[in-house]
Each structure stands twice: as C-alpha cells, then as structure tokens.
Image: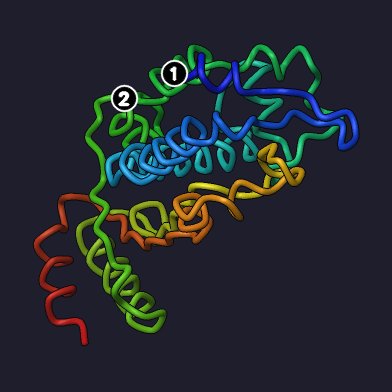
C-alpha cells in the first residue's frame, strides 16, 4: 500500500532520517514480505537463474574474443567489456555508461548469433531464442557432493561436444527479505525510534538469509544429470 506508506513517513530531525509512524508498520511489513517473495519466486526462479548464466557466459566469451581482436562491437560495448571485474574505471565514460541499455546489448547478441566462434554464436542463439539451460536445485548436497556432481556435468557436457566451463556450473542464490541497508527502517514509537525488526516478528524472520544452490547444464544432457543426482550419496 504505497499511499499508506507515504502517509506514514516522517522526518526525525535528531537522527536526520526518514522514519515510519507506528500506524504504518503493517504496510511496511507487507512491502517487505512481498519483496521477499519476489526474490524467492521471480528473481531467483530457476529459469531466470539459467537465463542469467547464459548471458554471463556469452559476455565472458565475447570479452575473450574482443581481447584477441576477433570480435566486432560498438564503442559502448567495448567500453563495458574492458572493465576490470565489476569496477567502473576511467575508461568507461559517463557517455558510454548512459548509452548502455537493453537495446544496445540485445542488438549485439542478435549479431553474434552468426559469429564464427561456435561457443559465442550458440550461447547468443540460446539466449535470444530462450533455448535455456536447465537449473536444478542441489541445495541438499554438501560441498563435496556438489563438486563431484559438477565434475560429472563437465564430463557429460564435453562428451556431448560442449565446451566447459561455459556449459555447466553451480550458481548460489540468496533471498533475504530485510537487511539494515544504511540505518535500517526506524519506527516512531512513544519511547523513541526503534528498528522495525525489533518490533515485528515477521520482519525479524525475514532477516534470516535463504541460500539455494543450482546446478546449471544444457538440456541435451539432462538424462545423464538426473541419473547422476539420483545416485549421489
């Protein structure tokens, strides 16, 4: 209830921050719960996990080919690809930063479908056509079992003619309904300001992170992977 949240907001001159009147706490609780379910059911949905994986692998392959002068891209994409990790440095101008949007990268993914490099072209085709990899929940496996399963996945992928590690990996997803951010969400009570997590059992439960592990692999080797998981100790 956006209107109710806005009506409940106030400014505390002592802490110099926005606070929420006690009457608005239920609306904030509802917002945080819905946000938690968005992460659990949408952002961390297995199809989204798989799509993100393919996109990252395609960009990683494109970055490698670009460094070898075997790829054509416009100045905006080049500026993004030459970054060191996720840090933005002086080589990425504000102009290039603002010019990068879905249209720019989608255009390049479309073009790279016909690139001579089979890995890049296939990954781009899969993303554009939504011919996604599979993502299966392996949270119940321990680290040793996950590592063993990943090795099997790479073996099956190579046997099917795919290049690893582009065609198989493990992704960890996190869902957390509430964190303190900077100063947290403060509720205005008769005794002063209090963290919402101290007043609300619902929000307190949302502070616990929920971690899931996903094995990602091409659907072409699904039968082998399902068999490997069934025989896992």
Q: In this view, does 156 lie above or below 105?
A: below
* Residue 89 picture location, percent across and down: 82, 34
Residue 219 can be seen, yes or no: yes
Kindly indicate whether the residue at mark 1 contacts the one at mark 2 (C-beta within 8 angstroms): yes
Task: Find the residue positioned furthest to the front.
Answer: 190
Q: Residue at x 27, y 61 (%)?
A: 137
Quarter in which the C terminus is drawn = bottom left
Depth check, front residue: 102 or 206: 206
* Residue 44: quadrant of the picture: top left
Query: What element does badge 1 sit on?
Result: helix
> Which disc number belongs to residue 84?
none
* Residue 97 picture location, percent across and down: 71, 19
Tell me how many marks there are. 2
- Left or right for 149, reference 197: left
| Residue bearing the label numbered 2 | 128
Mark 2, Cα crowd under 10 Å, few <14 / some 14-19 / many 20+, is some
Real-space Cα separation, disc 2 to disc 1, in angstroms: 8 Å
> Which disc number belongs to residue 106?
1
Q: Which residue is drawn at 60% across and 35% down?
A: 22
Mark 1, Cα crowd under 10 Å, few <14 / some 14-19 / many 20+, is some
* Residue 37 picture location, percent across and down: 36, 41
Q: Earlier in the sequence, mark 2 or mark 1?
A: 1
Depth check, front residue: 184 or 45: 184
């Amino acid at each position: 209830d956006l209107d109710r949240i806005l009506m409940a907001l106030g400014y505390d001159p002592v802490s110099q921050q926005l606070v929420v009147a006690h009457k608005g706490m239920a609306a904030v609780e509802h917002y945080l719960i819905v946000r938690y379910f968005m992460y659990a059911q949408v952002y961390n949905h297995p199809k989204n996990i798989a799509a993100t994986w393919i996109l990252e692998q395609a960009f990683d392959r494109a970055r490698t080919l670009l460094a070898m002068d075997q790829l054509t891209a416009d100045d905006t994409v080049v500026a993004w690809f030459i970054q060191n990790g996720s840090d933005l440095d002086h080589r990425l101008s504000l102009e290039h930063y603002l010019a990068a949007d879905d249209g720019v990268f989608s255009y390049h993914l479309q073009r790279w479908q016909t690139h001579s490099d089979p890995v890049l072209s296939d990954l781009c085709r899969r993303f554009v056509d939504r011919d996604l990899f599979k993502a299966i929940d392996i949270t119940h496996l321990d680290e040793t079992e996950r590592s063993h399963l990943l090795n099997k996945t790479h073996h099956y992928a190579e046997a099917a003619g795919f290049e690893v590690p582009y065609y198989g990996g493990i992704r960890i997803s996190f869902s957390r309904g509430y964190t303190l951010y900077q100063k947290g969400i403060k509720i205005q009570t008769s005794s002063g300001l209090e963290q919402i997590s101290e007043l609300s059992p619902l929000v307190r439960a949302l502070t616990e992170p929920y971690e899931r592990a996903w094995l990602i692999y091409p659907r072409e080797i699904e039968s082998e992977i399902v068999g490997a998981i069934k025989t896992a100790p």
